[in-house]
Amino acid sequence: MGKIALLTDSACDLPLELEKKYPQIEILPFEITVGGQTYVERRDFTFESYYDLLAKSTEIPKTSQITAVRFLERFCAYADEGYSDLIYVSINRAGSGSNDAARMAANMLCEERPGTAMRVHVVDSRTYSMAYGWHVCEAARMLQSGADAPTLVAYLEDKFARMEVMLSMYTLRYVKNSGRVSAAAAFAGELLGLRPIIRMIDDKTATVAKVRGDTAVMPGLIAQAKKRMAEGSPYGVGGTDEGNIKMLAKICKAEFGRPPVATFLLGACVATNTGPNAVAIVYEGEQRGFPSA
């Protein structure tokens, strides 16, 4: 078996304890610009300090995609270290140009390193946050057990053809500004105390329900997830507040009959759109078709 590297980006929202547990996973960080200042995710701020920054900001932070130049730099380094295969798992291609930039860098690699035998596998997660971060960890576990690159890629593509995200938030200010729902709908929702339940699948984001009041958010989220979740599916619970995450995990355990496989904080890429007061469930639905490259 060849020498295999696993690469992903910081939108995977891998908890720090899992990042330490699987040092073979390299996480390329996104850059966030707010108030004229550019920050590097997972280096210049913690999850919690970013929520504070977001709450105080009068403008929408801007996330910069990872460029082909940055990818090529890392690809060359892996090639120089004698890796036979590099697997990069990206944030949803529909929501970021990073996947395309990685593909471009893979095509440029042979020019930068003539004769290299390293194969680059660019895998579109088709999703966000720990909906793909968890499976990158699973790939690391499989790698430790001796899995080869084709097996790892097949596993990841199968899982990403199933993953879904159900999320909600306790204020509509940020989701309104991000364009996820119309300004009129967001304004009416605030006046009426409505909270959206939003489902994210591949390139489609839809408000599938609205609940009234903060206390209805978690039950509403769980009710919608139960409609979509495949039988026996592992699931994860995330958010922007540890207390809410623990509460949601407890309710989910009672409703689903099993605890979440992971709990996590939402990183900058997701939190910028949802705001610093969101909760989410990630889970497997029924398998969908594979998108064209």
Image (spheres, helix red, strand yellow):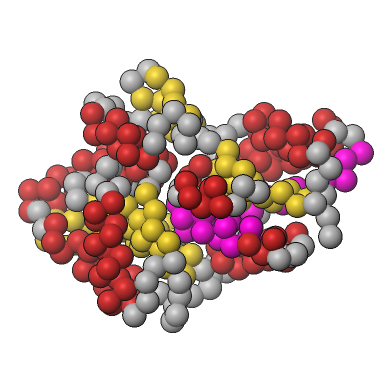
The reply, left or right, for residue 99 in relation to residue 187 is right
User: Is residue 171 in the magenta section?
Assistant: no
Occupied quadrant, residue 258: bottom left
Whole-percent x, y for residue 101 in the image: 63, 38
**Quadrant where the C terminus is found in the figure:** bottom right
Occupied quadrant, residue 273: top left
User: Is residue 116 in the magenta section?
Assistant: yes
The reply, left or right, for residue 41 in relation to residue 195 is right
Q: Is residue 158 above or below residue 79?
A: below
Whole-percent x, y for residue 133 in the image: 51, 54
**Quadrant where the N terminus is found in the figure:** bottom right
Q: Is residue 94 visible?
A: no
Q: Residue drawn at (27%, 49%), measured in percent from left and top?
A: 241
Q: Is residue 287 above or below residue 25?
A: below
Q: Is residue 116 above or below residue 67?
A: below
| Badge count | 0
The reply, left or right, for residue 272 in relation to residue 171 is right
The reply, left or right, for residue 25 in relation to residue 231 is right
Whole-percent x, y for residue 274 in the image: 30, 46
Q: Residue drawn at (56%, 52%), measured in percent from left and top?
A: 21
Q: Residue drawn at (9%, 54%), measured in percent from left and top?
A: 193
The residue most toward the left is 191
Q: Residue drawn at (48%, 65%), measured in percent from left and top?
A: 163
Q: Is residue 64 visible?
A: yes
Span shown in magenta = 115-140
Nearer to the camera, 203 or 53: 53
